[in-house]
Image (spheres, grey):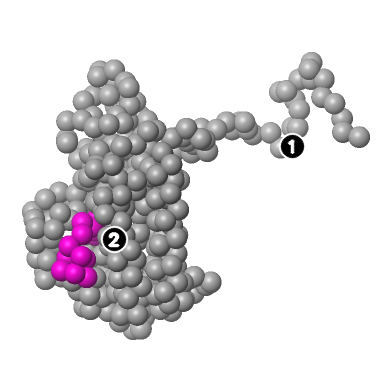
């Protein structure tokens, strides 16, 4: 028989071995919110009555990964054909370097041609600053895509590092350096930020920099959302456009992930079909698709991406294929928080 708890029990002394200051809180830690929109998401009206906003994200990282040639003390270990690879301390990893080079030498161009020439669809590029510096032809192609194909290039940080234990002053410099690289090599600063492997200070540094409309270091929703961040003794809204690690070709490089392009295509089509049905029933959402030059840039996997794009483009105006920057502008215009101007500080001014 369970023990009935009396109303006059002293909550301050109950469960002394397991109590925590955050018990019972749904919003805590400055960044966690386990409730979100709950079952009442905002009424979203995407352009042209679209039921889903679809964003393709091409991660350009090759040349910015861990490598002794880049001044690091170990080799890269993540997201390659060598599933489960370990970092090698104080040595180069010849195979890992070559696998990354495939992305910048061949995979990027296959995906670039597919997206710009065959389908001519908008795309957001998460670009690592150091990687951009190493490849002038890629930068030239991105300048063309920004001007003629409605692409956006967001910052993916200066390095493709795990920033968990990177000091704030170093990360701050990396963010500023990456912004400057974008300006010099692409002719336009990034308005979006995806560090990828951030820490609890990253968002504060992104807002401190002052020029970003949004960041995507979150995976917690199917819609953009606002978070209030303390800045100069004021709470200011900051836009989060969640990213994805599920509708993402990184699952080719993990155990029990995708094994061939057809599996990738089927999963993406199923995801879009389900979100499309939700949108038709009155609750439009957004969908991100994560792509990597060295992964889905392989021919057999690119075929799966091609099949998904055939399906997505066949849906016409019901699917708004767009960039994260355009989604951000839409959210600023139609879903800006109802706050006093003196508190918000003119958050629309950068649009």
Image quadrant in which the C terminus is located: top left
Nearest the viewer among 48 and 163 is 48
Give the x, y percent position of residue 20: 64, 34
Q: Say which label, 1 or 2, has the lower sequence index.
A: 1
Q: Which residue is mark 1?
A: 17
Check residue 118 for magenta coloring. Answer: yes
Q: Residues within 10 Å of mark 2 (few under 14, many from 20)?
A: few
Residue on which the image places disc 2: 314
Q: In the image, 41: left or right of 338? A: right
Viewer-proximal residue, 136 or 327?
A: 327
Give me the residue at 69% from left, 33% from top.
19
Binning the other alpha carbons within 10 Å of mark 1 as few (below 14), some (14 to 19) or many (20 upward) gives few
Q: Quadrant of the N terminus?
A: top right
| x then y, percent, for residue 67 | 32, 72
Q: Residue 153, percent across and down?
A: 20, 55
Q: Residue furthest bottom?
A: 94
Magenta includes 236?
A: no
Span shown in magenta = 114-127
Looking at the image, which is closer to me, 235 or 48?
48
**What SS does tag 2 mark?**
helix
Residue at the image point whose x is 17% and y is 62% from the top:
120
Q: Is residue 160 above or below residue 26?
A: below
Residue 338: image quadrant is top left
Label at residue 267? none
Determine the secondary structure under disc 1.
Answer: loop
User: In the image, what residue occupies the spot 8% across and 56% down?
Assistant: 147
Q: Is residue 163 visible?
A: no
């Amino acid at each position: 028989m369970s023990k009935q708890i009396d109303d006059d029990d002293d909550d301050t002394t109950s469960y002394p071995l397991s109590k925590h200051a955050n018990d019972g809180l749904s919003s805590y830690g400055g960044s966690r919110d386990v409730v979100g929109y709950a079952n009442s998401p905002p009424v979203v009206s995407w352009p042209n009555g679209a039921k889903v906003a679809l964003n393709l994200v091409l991660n350009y990282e090759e040349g910015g990964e861990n490598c002794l040639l880049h001044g690091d003390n170990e080799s890269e270990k993540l997201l390659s054909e060598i599933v489960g690879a370990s970092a090698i301390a104080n040595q180069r990893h010849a195979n890992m370097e070559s696998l990354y080079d495939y992305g910048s030498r061949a995979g990027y161009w296959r995906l670039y041609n597919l997206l710009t020439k065959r389908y001519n669809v908008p795309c957001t590029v998460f670009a690592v600053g150091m990687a951009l510096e190493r490849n002038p032809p890629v930068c030239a192609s991105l300048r063309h895509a920004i001007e003629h194909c409605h692409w956006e290039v967001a910052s993916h940080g200066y390095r493709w590092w795990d920033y968990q234990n990177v000091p704030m002053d170093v990360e701050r410099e990396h963010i500023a350096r990456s912004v400057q690289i974008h300006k010099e090599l692409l002719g336009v600063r990034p308005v979006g930020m995806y560090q990828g492997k951030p820490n609890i200070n990253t968002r504060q540094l992104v807002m401190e920099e002052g020029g970003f409309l949004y960041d995507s270091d979150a995976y917690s929703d199917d819609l953009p959302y606002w978070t209030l961040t303390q800045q100069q003794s004021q709470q200011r809204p900051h836009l989060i456009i969640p990213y994805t690690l599920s509708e993402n070709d990184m699952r080719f490089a993990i155990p029990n992930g995708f094994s061939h392009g057809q599996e990738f295509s089927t999963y993406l089509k199923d995801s879009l079909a389900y979100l499309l049905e939700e949108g038709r029933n009155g609750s439009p959402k957004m969908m991100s698709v994560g792509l990597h030059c060295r992964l889905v840039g392989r021919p057999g996997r690119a075929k799966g991406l091609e099949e998904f794009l055939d399906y997505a483009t066949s849906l016409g105006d019901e699917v708004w294929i767009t960039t994260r920057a355009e989604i951000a502008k839409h959210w600023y215009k139609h879903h800006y928080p109802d706050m006093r101007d003196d508190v918000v500080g003119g958050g629309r001014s950068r649009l």
